[in-house]
Amino acid sequence: MSQEIVPPQSKTALVSASEIVVPAAIAAAGEPAVRRFLEFFAATIRNKNTRMAYYRATCSFFAWLEQHGISELIAIEPLHVAAYVEALQDSAAKPTVKQHLAAVRMLFDWLVICQVVAANPAHAVRGPKHVVRRGKTPVLNEEQARRLIDSIDTSTLVGLRDRALIGVMTYAFARIGAVVAMRVDDYYPNGKRWWLRLHEKGGKRHEMPAHHKLEIFLDEYIAAAGIRDDGKGALFRTARGRTGELTGEAMHRIDAYRLIRRRAAEAGFKQKLGCHVFRATGITAYLEAGGTLENAQAMAAHESPRTTKLYDRTDDAITLDEVERIAI
């Protein structure tokens, strides 16, 4: 990379070409170290969200080192990494702490491979134990999900878009990142039915038949938007102000999050709902209707059935019934 490194004035150096803040300890180690630092994020991490999360985590680690007077790479020891992990637990949840440790460990693995440092100070450091058997994502029951969807005013193009977007997350168990990345051609005919093509995490292409209700949602939205022939265009598009017209730009995850919050408030929901609620709601509804965990895993494109099980809330009612047996 050819970015010019601006010497640090105090604690950080700035790569001016891309406005990436390089930790002072990396900048002080010379241009090769800076280049390898940038290459770690640009070349080894393909997922944009993971890249940004790991970048923030490593910058947080180096900022902590600076606060404690450690300004050279060769001075960083396992004791420092362990102390950082311990300090981070006072203000962050365990999953966040584990993510920070993973980011630091991966970065130093890369620096060792590139011969910037001799050893990885994070290699022997262990993070906090964190076992999850039940996900935190709220789940709507069937009545609540129908109430929210039915509350959307579908006399407008934006309303048709929002209903279709929520429908894809609910009936196809889709992550919001995959939904907003869909093109018009990703909703396509296959025999007598229509299918969805989702580009999930890790570069996985996942295909699902569309539920008959979802077909109605998408068909009405696409027809009203007049985008059926724009195969390479974004399926879910941003609105132009308050005009009710759609632009040619794809929605962002943040746009989707805001519309979910707005639609939930309009439907009278008091709890704060996010996009992931509908993925969890769809999986739970499927399992409650007699679907198998194995099929739910395949439909959700999960690598492990343990991940799918986190979304399964079918045991909640059983647990409540058993608790009420305590006749005191």
Image (spheres, grey):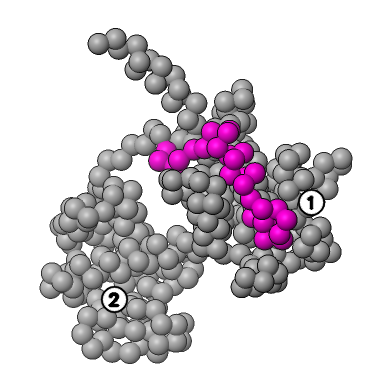
Please identify the quarter of the rendering in which residue 192 is found: top right
Q: Give the spatial CA distance, label 1 vs label 2.
A: 51 Å
Q: Against 149, is 247 above or below?
A: below
Residue found at x 74% / y 67%: 233
- Residue span colored magenta: 135-162
1 or 2: tag closer to the N-terminus: 2
On residue 219, the disc is 1
Does the rendering let one see residue 283? no
Q: Residue at x 25, y 65 (%)?
A: 61
Q: Secondary structure at mark 2?
A: strand
Q: Residue at x 62, y 59 (%)?
A: 180
How many numbered discs sit on the rendered protein?
2
For this rendering, which residue is in front, 244 or 256?
A: 244
Q: Residue flagged by tag 2: what amino acid is it? A: Pro
Front tag of 1 and 2: 1
In the picture, the disc for residue 23 is 2
- Across and down, in percent, residue 128 comes to 25, 45
Residue 145 appears in the picture as rendered: yes
For the C terminus, the quadrant is top left
10 Å neighbourhood of mark 2: few (<14), some, or many (≥20)? many
Image quadrant assignment for residue 25: bottom left
Left or right relative to 196: residue 324: left
Kindly identify the amino acid type of the residue bearing the numbered disc 1.
Asp
Given residues 78 and 308, the one toward you in this image is: 308
7 in relation to 102, above or below: below
